[in-house]
Amino acid sequence: MELLRCSRSLVLLAAVLGLYAFFFDEPSAAVAGAGIAVFLIARAAFFLSAMQSAAGSLSVERKLSHRFIRQGSALTVTTSVRLLLPKTFSLTVSDRIPAGLSAGGHPHAPADDGSCTFSYSLTPLTIGEHSFMGVTLSFSDLFFSGSLAVAGVTAPTFTVLPSADYALKGADTYGESEGPALTPVMSQSVRSFREYVPGDDIRSIDWKLSARHDSLWVREYMGRSEDASLVIIDLPDAGAPFHPEAFARLKNAAAGSVAARFSSQRPVSILLISGPNLVSFLPRESDPLRLMAMMDRLTPATRLHHLSRYYSTASLRKRYHDLDDTPFSATLAGVTGPFLSRRPPTAFESGLARIFHGLRAGSAHLFTLAAQDRSHLRLIAERGAMGSMSVHLHVPRECDGPLLRRCGFSSVEVI
């Protein structure tokens, strides 16, 4: 609660009267100053009580333009608020938007008569199911102003689907074409039809069916099926500094990715690593409660092993095989050849090989802060390429850099 100009003037007047009574021994001035102080205290108690009473009569109704939307597309929100407001009060209502979304327009409006309706747009940056965090009521009268956060009004929820650039190709809930190539003519193997979701490719719209139903419908194409989805989470080093806000956004994005895969009714495999250290592996888990509990408990892990500019044996063989025909190159190839033939893989490489070999996943999603040495990220991308698995990297914007584009990932998403 803050004092406004009128109350600040009364506080100053009460202080002046108190000093006057103290120095000149005037009881009447002391009584007047005490009366002003009592009035302000009573008025503050009335203001706080009126705030609580008005919040108790709050009624909020939100309407969304879509309940399902793809990542990066605009969502229109219309919020209507009603409450019993004292006559001497003024009010401004603000919507508390979910985390991971950017607002366009003004998610607030004055409600001096106790009711207001305002509209704004949201652009979701993270996938998964989202709900609102409530509303903020900002009251003011002639003497005081204060804000009250009401967290109970969170409905409705909406689901953000992966954008077309990062969605799993194949038998997912919302379907994509078989190949990533953008061609005017797609595969004729149509699996089913569904209603249009904002952010879908407009070339997949079936115009005849849309005209028949007076709403947009899109075609879902056949693709390769996958038995499981692999989500890899790279935990930061507990013994090194990291960005807490970026790690919180990373966990939110990973949890949204796991939730989106459960919506397709496919088991999810979770691999937890910390640099070149395998922390734990949960293969083909079908219990969403167990997975969400594990996602909530994600914390930095201690890294017992480290890599420094490490390259796999396959990449080194390719590098030294493509040398020019000079005496030095021949000598270098003769030295490195026997060494690489006897070079054992690291424990991290062996563990990755066993995990990737046992999964029939066409794609993997890696969430990382990309801190310290990034050799383990390059090893994951190489292992995916060896198994014809596309590996998609998700990294917070504070940790993004041009070196990540050289690791061989199928795509890089900045969170």
Image: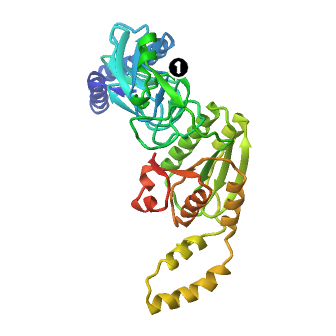
Instruction: Give the side of residue 362 with respect to residue 153, left or right.
Output: right
Q: Is residue 90 visible?
A: no
Above/below status of 12 relative to 390: above
| Residue 260 coordinates in the image, percent (x, y) | 58, 35
Q: Quadrant of residue 12?
A: top left
Question: For this rendering, which residue is in front, 51 or 15?
Answer: 51
Q: Quadrant of the N terminus?
A: top left
Above/below status of 187 relative to 346: above
| Residue 101 coordinates in the image, percent (x, y) | 43, 34
Above/below status of 180 relative to 68: below
Identify residue type, mark 1: Ala
| Residue 53 coordinates in the image, percent (x, y) | 48, 12
Q: Is residue 120 visible?
A: yes
What kind of element bears circle 1?
A: loop
Q: Residue at x 51, y 79 (%)?
A: 320
What residue is disc 1 on?
Answer: 155
Above/below status of 87 relative to 153: above
| Residue 258 coordinates in the image, percent (x, y) | 61, 39
Question: For this rendering, which residue is in front, 247 or 395?
Answer: 395
Judging from the image, the colouring scheme is rainbow
- Count the marks: 1
